[in-house]
Image: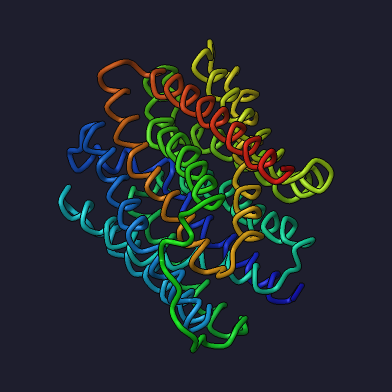
Amino acid sequence: MNRRALAILFVILFLVMTGFSILFPVLPHYARQVGATETQWGWIVAAYSFMQFLFSPYWGSLSDRVGRKWVLLTGLAGYAATFLALAYAQTLLQVFLIRAASGALTAATLPTAMAYVGDNTTREERAKGMGVLGAAMGLGVIFGPMIGAFLSEISLATPFLASAASGAATFLLALLLLPESRPAYTGPRPSRWEVLRGQMGVLNLVSFSVSFVIAGFEATFALFILDRFAMGQMAQGYLFGLIGVAAAVMQGALGHRLMKRYGDEAGVVGGMGLVAAGLLLMAAAWSPESLYWMVPVYGLGFGLVRPAVATLVSKRATRQGAAIGAMDAMDSMGRVVGPIVAGFAYGQLGGTSPYWIGAVVIVLSLVAFRYVSSAQAAALRQ
């Protein structure tokens, strides 16, 4: 493992996720300020993710051909520019278009960073490397919402400016310090569909399902605790921070040890189970105080399942960029559909409905994953 490069990637993703999650407690209120309803807010969130769905496979495949560094820099530059533009958006249409452009450009960031880790780790180290990236993102989610809640007291535009500054800092860090991880590829271009067949297809389905649920949660949680418990932006920031703490602990300290002992597939199953349990607990929350021990269950779950899926994809891939780009595309598609469904359910069926729906989707996906995994294991034994 190239520890220096991994450390640089850790810092980059920490800063990216800090800047990104600064907006978690702010964006729903910002959307309401420009006149968006809950359903329209779901479409704004979905626009970002739909563009990531379209562009993640392209950026991943491009990084296989031209190398990781310049694709990563493109994503970081787009991140800074679009968040700066969002700070000055005045209308609902402007917010929608800027978020769509941001999704297209920032889709180059995460899959390229994960492919970079795949280039620089052995199979035995892969789970640890993915866990390090996950821990960086989890730590960013700890600090970002609290910073965003604090900065929003100045103005709703201030967190967007802070996010843009974070993107500019990461761009300079990558430009000056991050080495290229692989030479440009000059061989024939494989079929783009190979990453959606067989075991890869199953893992991409899991990625979609988990992302669908997580995105629905993120799109409605700030509204849920505001409408149900009248919790202000600072309290929302603390709760998002608790989720990030739990995810970072799992990704940085526990996850790779658990997967080393029990296997990567067990990590997927255990993570999905914890996510479902966390959603059901939050749907049944009876007081603001009860949320403070419920949300970490959810955070532990997604802190385990996402690195486990990424590790399995990376281990089974012949082309890291293309495979992880496809996984990220399915993750993004979940983020397209999840906020739309959750926003509609929140407005039409009640504030807890997104969490009940999410728990059902996770359980069904878990059953499907176990069924396919068992069938594949039986086929290998024959």
Residue 207's place in the image compared with 73, above or below, is above
Name the residue located 59 percent from the left edge and 18 percent from the top edge.
Answer: 289
Looking at this view, name the residue that lies furthest to the front.
382
Q: Quadrant of the C terminus?
A: top right
Looking at this view, name the residue that lies furthest to the top.
286
Q: Quadrant of the N terminus?
A: bottom right
Q: Which of the 4 image quadrants contains residue 108? A: bottom left
Figure disc tally: 0
Please state the horizontal and vertical placement of residue 16, each as a whole percent of the image: 51, 61
Please state the horizontal and vertical placement of residue 377, each as a whole percent of the image: 69, 41
Of 149 and 106, which appears nearest the observer? 106
Q: Which of the 4 image quadrants contains residue 118? A: bottom right
Of 1 and 9, which appears nearest the observer? 1
Please state the horizontal and vertical placement of residue 98, each as a whole percent of the image: 25, 59
- Colour mode of the rendering: rainbow
Left or right position of 306 against 354: right
Please state the horizontal and vertical placement of residue 136, each as a whole percent of the image: 64, 57
Name the residue located 57 percent from the left edge and 88 percent from the top edge.
Answer: 183
Name the residue located 45 percent from the left edge and 43 percent from the top edge.
Answer: 208
Name the residue located 67 percent from the left edge and 53 percent from the top edge.
Answer: 135
